[in-house]
Amino acid sequence: MQGVDLFGYSANDNKVKKEHTSRRDMKLLKRHRDWGMHLNQEDIDFLEYDAPTQLIALVEYKTTLHLKEARLPKSGEENYANLIAMSTLANRAQLPLFLVFYNPDLKYWRIFSVNESANRKGPPEGVIIEYKYVDFLYWLRKRQLPEDIRQRLHGGGF
């Protein structure tokens, strides 16, 4: 078919491509851990961008049942070294880095600024609803939240 990519999407589709690699990526992640403790690595959850040349932010996501207690890890705690490595990358790329916690049903979110660039963006504080988080992602891109997405977020249509 002309104008259709490998996954069946045309350039005119107003959809985000579906995830096709999660099983392969998990297998590689587990294998990489078998190679030894001196081969540190971190999977980068999301590189937010608006166009291939307009990078917006790095985002590390963590799920939790206790959003009010979520916080940035401290030295020596789990995920601290990974976050420092990602912060170094974000700083070199001059990008904000956010650590975002969400509850398993995706209704509530909490955003933490990891580096100075993220602090300057001023993300919403405290626990927020999904609508506010998605609006923040559009705001980072200097875009307005589309009305159809706004309605689905308010109506629980996802």
Image (cartoon, rainbow, N blue to C red):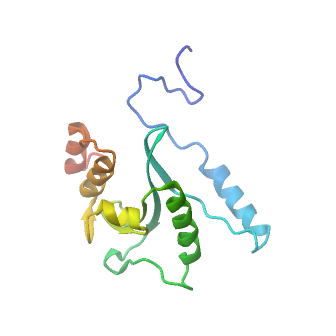
Q: Can residue 107 be seen in this view?
A: no
Q: Is residue 76 visible?
A: yes
Residue found 30% across the figure and 47% down from its top: 138
x, y percent for residue 78? 55, 80
Q: Above or below — where is 10 with respect to 107?
A: above
Q: Which residue lies furthest to the bottom in this view?
A: 76
Q: In which quarter of the image is residue 86?
A: bottom right
Residue found 22% across the figure and 44% down from its top: 150
Q: Which of 49 and 9 is in front in this view?
A: 49
x, y percent for residue 44? 55, 58
Q: Which of 9 and 144 is in front in this view?
A: 144
Q: In which quarter of the image is residue 152?
A: top left
State left or right for residue 71 relative to residue 17.
left
Q: In which quarter of the image is residue 108?
A: bottom left
Q: Above or below — where is 73 with respect to 15?
A: below
x, y percent for residue 126? 26, 72
Q: Residue furthest right?
A: 35
- The total number of labels drawn is 0
Residue found 43% across the figure and 68% down from its top: 115
Quadrant of the frame with the N terminus: top right
Q: Which of 44 and 152 is in front in this view?
A: 44
Q: Which residue lies furthest to the top in this view?
A: 2
x, y percent for residue 157? 27, 45
Residue found 56% across the figure and 25% down from its top: 5
Q: Above or below — where is 16 with respect to 48?
A: above
